[in-house]
Amino acid sequence: MYNKLLLYTAVLRPILTYGSPVWGYAADSNIKTLEVAQNSIIRNIVRADRYTRNSKIYEDTKILPFKSYIQKLAISFFNNLPNIDNENVKLLNNYIPMPDLKRPRRILLDSYNPPNN
């Protein structure tokens, strides 16, 4: 099981989360589709039946749930923006959400409170 989890975290999870720091405009249904895929993959790896709670599986395998993981990636990405040399990528941080838009970029960072500098 260890080797399968290692394969998942090294190969499959990066494929599922490619570009996730900039998925702020992604609908919840799109993120949910990827979350269901991750749940299915991990459930198959640990050979858990369908009555086992996902939270128990994540606790036992020490793998973050999908939304928590992409939130962690987004936080890391936006905290590292000042260190990036590409000026176009640095402009991603100057985003101002439209007030009538229901899905602002920071939907992934709802529970994140950045430190005040």
Image (cartoon, rainbow, N blue to C red):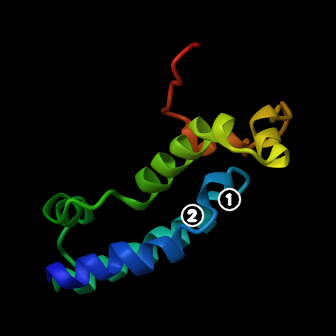
Instruction: Say which quadrant the C terminus sits in.
Output: top right
Image vertical order of residue 80 relative to residue 116, above or below:
below
- Image quadrant of residue 93? top right
Q: Secondary structure at mark 2?
A: helix
Marks 1/2 in contact by CB < 8 Å: the verdict is yes
Kindly identify the residue that appears in the image at 81 percent across and 35 percent down: 95
Q: What count of labels does the image hold? A: 2
Q: Position of residue 90 (x, y in %)?
A: 77, 40
Q: Position of residue 68 (x, y in %)?
A: 42, 51
**What number is the disc on residue 102?**
none
Q: Secondary structure at mark 1?
A: loop
Density class for disc 1 (Cα within 10 Å; few <14, some 14-19, many ≥20) is few
Q: Residue furthest top?
A: 117
Tell me the amino acid under the disc marked 2: Ile
Instruction: Say which quadrant the N terminus sits in.
Output: bottom left
Kindly identify the residue that appears in the image at 86 percent across and 34 percent down: 98
Kindly identify the residue that appears in the image at 74 percent across and 45 percent down: 85
Q: Is residue 49 visible?
A: no
Foreground residue among 17 and 82: 82
Tell me the amino acid under the disc marked 1: Ala
Residue denoted by label 2: 31
**What number is the disc on residue 27?**
1
Q: Is residue 10 visible?
A: yes
Foreground residue among 107 and 84: 84
Density class for disc 2 (Cα within 10 Å; few <14, some 14-19, many ≥20) is some
Image vertical order of residue 40 relative to residue 72, above or below:
below
Q: Position of residue 105 (x, y in %)?
A: 71, 43
Rounded to the nearest angstrom, the CA distance separating label 1 from label 2 is 7 Å
Foreground residue among 100 and 69: 69
- Image quadrant of residue 104? top right
Q: Position of residue 72 (x, y in %)?
A: 46, 47
